[in-house]
Amino acid sequence: MKRMLINATQPEERRLAIVDGQKLLDYEIEIEGREQRKGNIYKAVVTRVEPSLEACFVDYGEDRHGFLPFKEISRQYFAEGVSASQARIQDAIREGQELVVQVEKEERGNKGAALTTFVSLAGRYVVLMPNNPRGGGVSRRIEGDDRAELKEAMDQLEYPKGASIIARTAGIGRSAPELQWDLNYLLKLWGAIDGAAKGAKGAFLIYQESSLVIRAIRDYFNHDIGDILIDTDDIYEQAQQFMAHVMPEHAARVKRYRDDAALFSRFQIEHQIESAYART
């Protein structure tokens, strides 16, 4: 039987393993303090408009200001009366203006993070782009009959005008109701993000792209996986809540591991991890 194991007993790291019996299939680690900002969504304030760069700099609540190219600014933020086709950044955007942005590229060296106002929220089967009407379709990695079948299911989905959706590879073989369920979850999430942005002034973090635990369940969990075993209370609670929300029919597979033997030792995978990931 395949299992998902999540080890969080060390305060500074969380580890995920996918095993089949006692064979390691997949492994991921998340180090405390090195969490990525990519995918995070912030309320931001324009601090400087730079016509020569066709971009602006924004304060989004982190130490260094972010870089927002003009092409990444949705026309919903343009000043009234500015024609979208001939707009220049200095006419469309002003200092002090508030926007909702998502991190596209992490800070590097002395470069600030690259940002966009075209938000994308990844679910299990689909990605929702709530304010980008032209971004939809089916993942390029999906081909042939799978592509045609998925496109047919996607055509049946209901979502607001002005949004678009992309099917992920995990969506292959899923029915339209299953895809719609995932999409509804993302629409609820976007509603909460939008509400938080409108509810307060200034620059701040609104939404943190999922932790390892939630990403793991979203991306690795499937019908082959019998149990999700977790060895700490807080991570177990987090996984339980997420499962109950997103896949309630499988919530019973999330289990709190309580044996005396350490979780990864119990499945004899520590040495497999060491040999697979030994530094050469």
Image: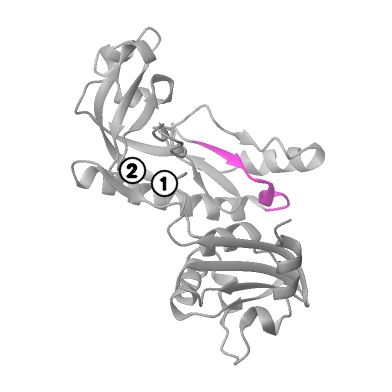
Q: In which quarter of the image is the N terminus?
A: bottom right
Residue 130, image x, y percentages: 44, 38
The total number of labels drawn is 2
The amino acid type, in three-letter code, at marker 2 is: Tyr
**Magenta includes 17?**
no
Tag 2–tag 1 contact (CB < 8 Å)? yes
Residue 90, image x, y percentages: 27, 13
Residue 115 sits in quarter: top left
**What kind of element bears circle 2?**
strand
Which residue is outermost to the right? 144
**Magenta includes 171?**
yes
Reply above or below: 90 against 147: above
Is residue 224 in sight in this rendering? no
| Residue at left offset 47%, top offset 73% | 235
| Residue at left offset 21%, top offset 24% | 95
| Residue at left offset 66%, top offset 68% | 17
Reply above or below: 6 against 266: above
Q: How crowded is mark 2: few (under 14 residues within 10 Å), some or many (20 or more)?
A: many
Q: Using residue 55 as the reference point, say whether residue 61 is left or right of it.
A: left
The amino acid type, in three-letter code, at marker 1 is: Asn
Q: Residues within 10 Å of mark 1 (few under 14, many from 20)?
A: some
Reply above or below: 45 against 79: below
Chain part drawn in magenta: 164-174
Which residue is outermost to the front? 280
Disc 2: which residue: 42
Disc 1: which residue: 40
Q: Quadrant of the C terminus?
A: bottom right
Reply above or below: 124 against 224: above
